[in-house]
Amino acid sequence: MGEHIPDSKFDQEERKAFVQHLLDDLKALEQILGNNLIESDVVRIGAEQELCLVDEDYRPSGESIQLLDAINDDHFTTELANYNLEINLDPFELKDDCFSKVESQLTNMLDKAKSKAEKLGIKIILTGILPTISKNELGIDFMTPIPRYHKLNEVLTQCRGDHFALKIRGVDELTLRHDSVLFEACNTSFQLHLQIPQKDFIPSYNWAQAIAGPVLGVCSNSPLLMGRELWKETRIALFQQSLDTRKWSYALKEQVARVGFGNHWQKESVAEIFKEDISTHRILLTKPINQNSLELLENGAIPKLEALNLFNGTVYRWNRPCYGVGNGKPHLRIENRYIPSGPSVMDEMANFAFWVGLMVGRPKKYDDMSAIMDFKEAKHNFIKSAITGRQTVFSWLGKTVTLKKLIFKEFLPIARKGLMDYGVDSKDVERLLGVIENRTKTGTGAEWQVENFRRLRKEMKLDSVLVKLTEAIHENQKKNIPVHEWGMINEKQSATEPYLWVGQIMSTRLIKLYENDYANLAVSIMQWNNIHHIPVENSHGELSGLLTWSHIAELEHHKEENNALVSDFMIHKVVTVQPRTKIETAKKLMEEYQIGCLPVCVGSHLVGIISKVDL
């Protein structure tokens, strides 16, 4: 989520000065581009690794600050939630054993973090969305205590003018409202950076957009969110909705999403992309800036364009253009933001090599994508791929083609040639692209999760399945074998942790009645489904009562009376518990009140029910 900007006041005076710096930065960038000052005689690669912290029970662990202090390494930094961290890897020139160097540094950094984490009772997991994350970990108390994050949350909420709404439909459906930006914290990615020569930036950027769908399809690793099976790469929908500042209205109007793929091919320069973003998105964050970029440029220095980079960090293109300064020289990069973390370091490195090879190996016929492909074709491919992953059928240059055919016939040869042309070690090329080849044949991380999730769900409670899945991901990652070699989880092995909370064992797929339902309907529903307890909701979707098996006799007496309502017979004063109520407490409540079930509520809304059978 970028720099911490600890000295910012976020007041009007600072905002006014920041806006002027932002405009001056764009003018400075245009001068830099006009004078061909961008470093273009070398190509470098770099990456950012986001990771999840879990406790001994494989649930989110909010100890990121303590772990960061223990690691004491500038390569590590915080993320929005206090159960995530990020590793910023060093850049390496694209040649020889560069991918082995990145892999070695990443492995060493992870080993360093793991050794410190172990002493704090923390485990480290690489996964696009942590299976065990729940609504409990999305409260404001799980936000990392840094001013930038709290200000970002405040500003985004103000822009939205309402709570954030999440609605994702896949095999299952997840519909949820939330009062903070912490939905975003469910996402963890492996962000890839590639330095681009100035004269090739626009053709490279458009090519990056064109290949995004197929690349995402073979890299998908985030099919689950809060126990729901959604998209193969659910992060795409989740990230856009978690940072969506657009206001809903009755008017049909076009609004540009803050997280998105874009709406057209780029034609001019990188400066035009930045201008478009500034024109369509509000400035969210500001900071004090001491030096003027135009003045620095006039004095022969290279400006960092601090205002532009801060603004650019709050616009979330899946392929993000970036400006930076290294060794006193300005450069341009494309940041690939759609690749998820995991399933293993080797899988991530394979994704990295595949994407870089495709980018630098672009055949000449793809220099002008606008002449051979409609932009909406590329955008549609990306969305379809996020939903269906490796099973996606693409539209490629006007023809229908499967992902498997496109990767084997077109993309792998391009990537192999691109890497070889840059002198990348042939052993690394074959090793890493071989992982992509086998994954294309066998299955992705998303498919491995879904297959195990469905199988385990037949035998175990949902919470146990999610814990078991997370544990298996952690164990496989320790072996550092690619996901196409991961075996199935042994469902007969007992769950890692004992049941502690009501939410772990409650039933969530409920049959409900409403206050104004007729008694004869209630009798039939309870008898058809052999239900001993059935909750009753009011017109606002709030729990208002409970019918139990003991009411059946009385209901039977009124069954023929068409005017008898459920509200006439239900219990109005209902004893309830919360998902984080201890099971022992629930057990005592049942004994004390001599009842056979307890509705489980968040506020006044029913989320489950726990019965003596569950106990």
Image: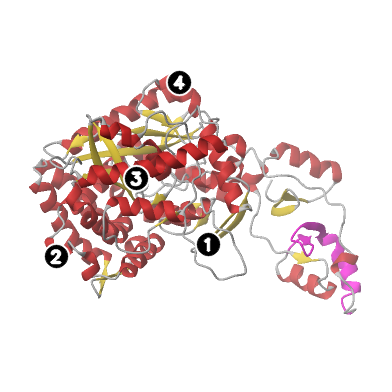
| Dot placed on the residue nearer the N-terminal end, 1 or 3 | 3
Could you say where residue 165 lies in the image, as x and y percent from the top left?
Answer: 59, 56
Report which residue position mark 3 lands on.
Answer: 26
Report which residue position mark 2 lands on.
Answer: 365
Amino acid, disc 2: Lys
Front residue of 614/450: it is 450
Amino acid, disc 4: Asp
Amino acid, disc 3: Leu
- Reply above or below: 569 against 97: below
Residue ID at (50%, 43%): 185
User: In 3D space, how far apart are the residues under numbered discs 3 and 4 (Cα atoms)?
Assistant: 37 Å
Report which residue position mark 4 lands on.
Answer: 69
| Dot placed on the residue nearer the N-terminal end, 4 or 1 | 4
Report which residue position mark 1 lands on.
Answer: 172
Q: In the picture, which quadrant includes the N terminus?
A: top left
From where the camera sits, is residue 343 visible?
no
| Dot placed on the residue nearer the N-terminal end, 3 or 2 | 3
Specify whether 229 is left or right of 90.
right
